Image (cartoon, rainbow, N blue to C red):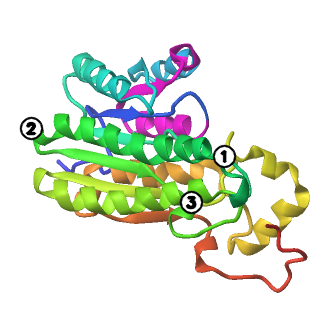
Amino acid sequence: MVKKMFDLTGKVAIITGASRGLGQYFGRALASAGADLVITSRSINSLEKFREEIESMGRKAFPVELDVCDYNSIQQMVEKAYEEYGKIDILVNNAGCNIRKPALDITWDDWNTVLDTNLRGSFFIAQAVARKMIPRNYGRVINIGSVTSVFGYAGITPYCASRGGVKQMTMSLADEWGKYGITVNCLAPGWFKTEQNKILYEDKEWVEYICDRIPLKRPGQPDDLNGIIVFLASDESEYMTGQTILVDGGISTGATRATSKKQVK
């Protein structure tokens, strides 16, 4: 009998930051492939509709409150997830935030908010989950980065620093945990419209500019990430680890189009 490829039936996936945006799209994709979910948010009430949606697909969705900036909250979330399912196969480290300001206006607290959420939180969630994966010699850790993991943009210095850190962290954890059968990869989306950046998409001139720089001539749509998230979560990616996979329509080629009317900073 030929094994069905990209089948996540029987797998359990934690998705942080699942109350909205890309986190929900990742959850739908994994559930469609057969996975049961642990979905997290700072407000457990914000997960109710998504839980109902996943269960309508015939999969389980266990909502858990999580503050990624609180060490005890991270430990409690992982313990609750483990008690519910008895194992954790997949982690999608998706929770994040951004603060848009010129570098000269960034405060000490601004820096800490972004780095604590995007980098420190992601590390300690991965650490707590890996402690459950190591005894089984199996795991898929998918850290969500950004095109800013490899590129810098004005006005979001802490965010770029945090996403660059996620890329480096991914490689270090991949090296350390590979002997336990755990792969660690970084999925780095390009320009996708999310709650964090939706204000940018209200500027038609900026949208024209950014689309002109993207070889495929459009921003990403959430469904563009379905295939790669399922691949990284599946057994078909077992020989890929420590990698940063850019899904960005080609903007990371670095091309600057001659037709651009204005360089938006």
At 76% from the left and 66% from the top, the residue drawn is 210
Q: Residue placed at 11% from the left, 56% from the top?
A: 179
Counting residues from the start of the chain, the first of labels 1 and 2 encountered is 1
- The magenta segment is 21-47
- Inspect the magenta stretch and tell me whether residue 32 lies in it: yes
Please name the residue that numbered disc 3 is placed on: 160
How far apart in space, not on screen, are marks 3 and 2 (Cα)?
34 Å
Using the rendered image of the protein, determine whether residue 241 is visible from the camera's viewpoint: no
- Say which residue label 2 marks: 135
Percent position of residue 94, x then y: 47, 42
Residue 180 x, y percent position in the rendering: 12, 50
Q: Which residue is mark 1?
A: 99
Asked if residue 25 shows in the view, the reply is: yes
Mark 1 against mark 2, which lies toward the viewer?
A: 1
Q: Quadrant of residue 219?
A: bottom right
Q: Are marks 3 and 2 in contact (CB under 8 Å)?
A: no
Image position of 161 (left or right of 85): right
